[in-house]
Image: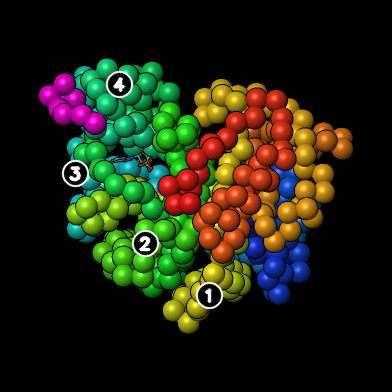
Amino acid sequence: MKVLIVGGGGREHALTWKINQSPYINELFVAPGNAGISKIAKTVDIDAEDIRCLASFAERNSIDLTIVGPEIPLANGIVDSFSKRGLNVFGPSQKAAKIESSKVFSKEFMYKFHIPTASFLVFSDAEEAIHFLEEKDFPIVIKTDGLAGGKGSVVAHNIDEARDAVVHMMIERTWGDAGKRVIIEEFLEGVEASVLAITDGENLIPFQPSQDYKRALDGNEGSNTGGMGAIAPHPKIDEQLLNEIVNNILKPTVDGLRYMGTPFKGILYAGIMLTKNGPKVLEFNCRFGDPETQVIFPIMKSDLLELILYALEGRILEADIEWNNKKAVCVVIASGGYPKRYRKGYTIEGLNNLDKAIKDKALIFHAGTARRGNAIITNGGRVLNVVGLGNTYKLATENSYATVNRIDFEKVFYRSDIASEYV
Ligand code: AMP
Ligand code: GLY
C-alpha cells in the first residue's frame, strides 16, 4: 500500500516508525514531516493544514490511505474533503471532531449522555464570567471553547489568576475566536490518565492507557503545555479500571455520537482524572495524543496499519491488539521559552550514531527539528522525544535520561522528574 501520514511532530514520527513496520507498506509519505521522519519515509513539503494541496498530492500519487495526526486539519474537515474526492482517509469527520474542537459541544454532549465529567457553566460575556468567579472557591478551571494547542486550560488558584485567564481568553483573544466562549468548571483532584481507543464508529478497542505530564516544570509546576513527557502502560490502571473507563466513558461516547448522526471513526482519546469518586473526563481529543503515542507504539506488538484497515471497514471487533511486557518512559526535550516564546535554529549536538548506541534501550522521535546542511537544528518548541524502554519503570526511566544527557543545544530544557513517582 501507498500511505500518506499528515503532520510533522513527535506523534507523527512515532506513527511513521510504527506504520513503516507493517508488511502492507510499499511506500510511505509524510507531509510535512521533520528531520527524523525524513530518515525513514519520503517527506513532502506540504503544510498539514493545507487540505486542498494534500488531497491533490494523494490523487496524483495514487495514495491508498491517508492517516491524519493533528487536530487542526480534522477540525477543518480534511476527512470530509478527502472522502468527497473519493480518497481513503482515517480519522473522524468535521462534525464528529467537534468532540475536541469545541469544549462547549463536548461538555454539553457529556451532560446529555451521562458521561462522568466536572460540573460546568458556559460564558460568552467576560464581565459575567468574572462576576461569577468572584463568588467562587478556588482552585477552579477556566477553558477556551475552541482549540488552543493544549494551552487553553487554566487552573486558577485565586481570583487574580482567574481574572487574568478570562481577560487573556475573552478580551485580549490570545487564542482568537477560540476564546469567544469559555467554560468554567469544577476542579478535580487525582491522577491523570490518557485512554485512547480505535473505533469504527460502532465498536472500539482500547490501547494501553498512558499518563501525560502536561505542566512545563518539575513537580507539575508552571503552565500547561502540549505535554512534557509520558509513560505507558499507566501504573494506576488495571484491567478492571480500564473496563470501567471503556464501559462508562468510551462506549457511551461512541454510541452518543452515532445516535446524533455523526458517527466517530478514528482514534478517540479521553483525557481522564482518576478521582476518588471514579474516573471523570477532563477532555476528549479526536486523534492520537502527543506525546502519548510515542510511548504506546513501542509497547504494541500488533500491526497498526492492519488495525486501521479493520476500523475503516467497520470490523474493529475482528481485530486484536497485542502488547509486549515493556514499560516506556518519554522525556520531551524542549527549547527554552516553550510553551511561550522560543527561538528556532539552534544546532542539536549528540544525535550522530545515537540510534545505534541506544538500540533496544531507547528510541528517539523527532518533533520540531529540521536539516541545515549536515546539521540538525531546532525548528519548534518541543524538539525531541526520548523514549526509554525497560522491564520496569525504573529501567525505562534510566534509559530515557541516560539518552537525554547525550543530547544538547543552546537553551535546551526538559523535565527531570518524568515517572519519578513510580521508580
Ligand atoms: P484540557 O485542555 O481540558 O485537557 O486541560 C488541560 C489540563 O488542565 C489537564 O490535563 C489537567 O491537568 C488540567 N485540568 C483540566 N480540567 C481540569 C479539572 N476540571 N480539574 C483539574 N485539572 C484540570
Ligand atoms: N498530550 C496531550 C494531547 O495530545 O492533547
Type of amino acid at the residue the image marks with label 1:
Glu
Type of amino acid at the residue the image marks with label 4:
Glu
Q: Nearer the viewer, mark 3 or mark 1?
A: 1
Q: Which residue is mark 3?
A: 119
Q: Residues within 10 Å of mark 3 (few under 14, many from 20)?
A: few
Please, which residue is most extreme toward the left here? Answer: 135
Q: Nearer the viewer, residue 379 or 156?
A: 156
Type of amino acid at the residue the image marks with label 3:
Ser
Q: Position of residue 243 (x, y in %)?
A: 32, 69
Q: Is residue 5 left or right of residue 274?
A: right
* Mark 2 Cβ inside 8 Å of ligand 1: no
Q: Position of residue 180 (x, y in %)?
A: 33, 29
Q: Residue at x 77, y 30 (%)?
A: 347
**Residue span colored magenta:** 132-139
Q: Is residue 303 left or right of residue 120?
A: right
Q: Which residue is mark 4?
A: 161
Q: Residues within 10 Å of mark 1 (few under 14, many from 20)?
A: few
Q: Which residue is mark 2?
A: 237
Q: Is residue 167 left or right of residue 20?
A: left
- Dividing the picture into quadrants, the one containing residue 209 is bottom left
Residue 134: within the magenta? yes
Q: Secondary structure at mark 1?
A: loop
Q: Which residue is mark 1?
A: 322
Rounded to the nearest angstrom, the CA distance separating label 2 from label 1 is 17 Å
Q: Residues within 10 Å of mark 4 (few under 14, many from 20)?
A: some
Q: Nearer the viewer, mark 2 or mark 4?
A: 2
